[in-house]
Amino acid sequence: MAFSGFEGFEKRLELHFFGDDPMILQLGLRKLDFECIQQTLEAAQCTVVSAVGNSYFDAYVLSESSLFVYPTKIIIKTCGTTQLLKSINPLIYFAHNHLGLTLSSCRYTRGSFIFPKSQPFPHTSFKDEVTCLENTLPPNLCYRKASIMPSKSSSYSWHVFTASHYPHITHTIDPPYTMEICMTELDPILARKFFRRPGDGKSGDSAGKEMTLLTGIDEINKEALICDFAFDPCGYSMNGMDGEWYSTIHVTPEDGYSYASFECVGSMSMDIVHVLRKVVQIFRPGTMSVSFSSKYEDEGWRKVAGAVETLGMKCRSCAMDQFPAEGSVVFQTFRRKSA
């Protein structure tokens, strides 16, 4: 059997709902009992380890990545060998039967797994994932598209599936863009900062806070409220909350299959160059991909290459695609010049 380490690359699922009762919509999905959240995550094979909320949304650090719950939107990211797509049916059921909400759109994205043969069904291939999505989603989400966005490396692609009740963009309150960064071959010295000292006697929360400060993660967005967690013996997760915007980081630091991800939803006022440069400085990856998704005519993706090239990252490829009611996705890959 081939060697398999921990799979860092996440699967990401974003579901949008709508309803007719304005009283329900004030909190919407945030009104779901924690038991419903637990059952949903059990279906995907992960659990909650830490949580925080503000007046806009709730953020959960999971045993494998993160969960964000807004009134009419839910985002789940899971890594390892989780079965994320199995969370769709419970979410549809709870949203409809407990809150009277109906699914209006679905978006599923992921990179290329480091250990694809270790993934359980339906994540055994993108074809299997698309088949599962097609069979699981209700027929009213009839505007659908699946795409594998390529790079110069045959083993490095971005997988996107979207399905919507509408043919055109309708979510006018959505953020201008979502940026997903995936990094591999982390600098080993920097990656060591995400290992805990044996017998440190600290909780995952306190050890996580120590890693946040030690690595400079708190400087990516100084306005954000950070909920962080350090795993034993290694690994790190963080959710940041800045008003209605979230950011999240997940780190698998083991040598040979090291991986880190950073994701954020951005406002027009966000300094995307500062964010990109800080993330690259914290991890100093050998390879990196940046997916920039926007429902509007946002040209922020054009700033990516200029922001990181001065830090030794050379752009290797750039691909763009359009999706019904979901706008554009630009997928760029980079490699360290000395690597």
Image (spheres, helix red, strand yellow):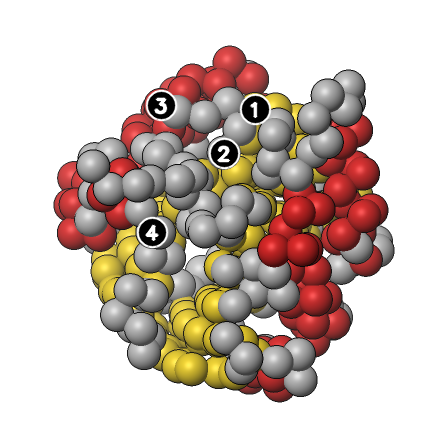
Q: CA distance from mark 3 to mark 1?
A: 13 Å
**At which x and y percent is residue 7?**
40, 43
Amino acid residing under circle 2: Glu
- Identify which amino acid the numbered label 3 is placed on: Ala
**Which residue does the image show at 20% across and 49% down from the upper left?**
125
**Dot 4 or dot 3, earlier in sequence:** 3
Residue at the disc numbered 3: 43
Question: Helix, strand or loop at disc 3?
Answer: helix
Q: Amino acid at mark 1?
A: Val
The quadrant holding residue 48 is top right
For disc 4, the neighbor class at 10 Å (few under 14, some 14 to 19, many from 20) is many
**Crowding near pointer 1: few (<14 within 10 Å), some, many (20+)?**
some
Q: Is residue 155 above or below residue 192?
A: below
Up-down: is 284 above or below 312? Answer: above
- What residue is at 49 percent from the left and 59 percent from the top? 184
Image location (x, y in percent) of residue 129: 22, 45
| Residue 13 appears in the figure | no
Amino acid type shown at disc 4: Phe
Q: Nearer the viewer, residue 163 or 147?
A: 147
Identify the residue shown where x is 27% and y is 38%. 118
Mark 2 closeness class: few <14, some 14–19, many ≥20 residues within 10 Å:
many
Closer to the N terminus: mark 3 or mark 1? 3
Q: Give the SS element for disc 2.
A: loop
> Residue under circle 4?
113
Left or right for 57, reference 331 = right
Q: How many callouts does the rendering have?
A: 4
Dot label at residue 48: 1
Assign a secondary structure to mark 4: loop
